[in-house]
Amino acid sequence: MPAAPNLQLPAAPHMGPAELAAELAELYALSLVRDLPFALMQDPHCTIWIDGTTRFTLHELLCELRSLSWFDDQALPVPGPIETVLCSRTVCGEADHRRGLRLNGDGQLTLRTLFRGVVARRGPEMRLSAFHRADPDARTDLEFSEAPDATAPMSRWLDWIERCSGASLTLPDEPEMAPPGVDTPRALVERIHQSHPCRTYFNAVLRLLARGAEFDPGLRPLAGEAPLAPQGILSMMAEAADLAFSSAMRMQGRADRLSRPGVFAARITSLLRTDEMPAHENGTLRAAAEELSHKAPNLLHWIDRYNRVHGRDGLDGQTLLLPAMRGAVPQHRADYVAQAMIAGALSTLLKALFDSRRHARLRMVGADKCGVDICSEADRLAADVALARSVAGGYFQAENHQDLRLGEALACQVLRSRLEAQGRSLSLGFTDFDGRAVTLSVHPRGLHGGHATFQRDGRLAPWPMERMRSGAHLAVV
């Protein structure tokens, strides 16, 4: 599947010293609570023991993070040159947006916002997506093949989905296979890594279709044939997943990609073991190391103790390596790279194609009597995938932020292409990962299909991450 022709892949996220220090600190913090049940994550008095003498509470862990400049408005330095300033919202607009998603309405980092990740999802409670409960374990002998045509019979699509992803259709009157509980961050990582990146989404969509979930009101036919068949939804999901995978591979192969968090942690370990930091070392990394050392010393002590308990004892000084997650290696590393981008694309399709308005709720397996809010659960599922990547220590939250939104942009391009081909007046709306209302509208153009427009919060806007067309060149004679 070729990459979307109109999409401009962005550069890797730029992180100043303050953000880099905060990102590493957050990965350290997540690694320390991998085995803590999610049910205890909001209890500030919950105590985590590292060894017989070293322990801390979630409140103390949160205080270490809050002490960093990135999470403290009063500590942010005065804007200056990008090489020397720790963080400046006038210099780093995208970075400030990432920072805002980590804080609550009062501008504070809390336990809930720490585990919320980079999605502005609704709801005060801290929990995983309900779609996990409709995703039982499946076959592992998956095989790759091209997706059927959008007009192929549903039986061919069901067969292809099961062979390629492990997802399967369960009719409402059939007994459900209860999936194993995901009660800790470690269990979430293992489940995400051992699953095909599309499986949970295909299972969710098949259950929504089997239970008669309504499409977005703008897709309901006024007369004649419905503009969208179930096979069309599955076809769009397959196309968006392929585009996300190829885009993730392209991003991975770029020269400007970020080094892995483990590399940064190893370099900071080396820097802080010397009395004087080498002058030739990267200025951003040196400033981030100083920030962590001076403002979060207890966090570094806990990580050092954790590494020593698990056999990673340094010869001299603290060992600040990111703790490894043994036994949680994904089946296919390429899927691991593309997980967040695929999640961003498929969550967007779920929100856009089904009726995700607040009053539109549907009963699903394992759901409470209030039913399932499709928009909220799709956002939570994307956030869960991103959280799993960070808990495993493989990706910064800044990368998760970018990958989810790139997947969202890819989904918008797929919707644009499919809806314009309909050649009729259609519209659909959803809430994006930043909590803004998005509307896609198609206006017929006679025999030439339709023309789609993109609106954000009621105003026309450029299609996200679309490559700008070059203007006409004028020659002077």
Image (cartoon, helix red, strand yellow):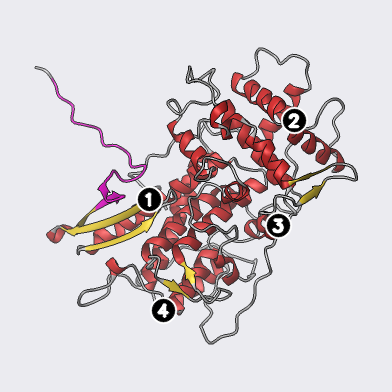
Amino acid type at mark 3 = Leu
Cα separation, mark 2 vs mark 4, equals: 54 Å
**Number of residues whose C-alpha sits closer than 10 Å to that of mark 4, classed few (under 14), some (14–19) or many (20 or more):** few
What residue type is disc 2 on? Pro
Q: What residue type is labelled 1?
A: Arg
Marks 3 and 2, the one that precedes in the sequence:
3
Q: Where is residue 222 in the image (x, y as percent from the top left)?
A: 21, 74
Q: Quadrant of the C terminus?
A: top left
Q: How far apart are marks 2 and 1 (CA)?
A: 38 Å
Quarter occupied by residue 17: top right
Residue at which label 2 appears? 297
Q: Is mark 3 on a helix, strand or loop?
A: helix
Earlier sequence position, callout 1 versus callout 3: 3
Q: Which amino acid does label 4 sit on?
A: Gly
Furthest residue to the bottom?
173
Tell me which label, 4 or 1, sits earlier in the chain. Answer: 4
Q: In this view, does 133 lie above or below 1?
A: below
Q: Which segment is the magenta one?
A: 453-475
Is there a contact, CB below 8 Å, between mark 1 and mark 3? Answer: no
Residue bearing mark 4: 212
List the residue tagged with mark 1: 436
Label 2 vs label 4, nearer the camera:
2
Residue at 50% over, 69% down: 204
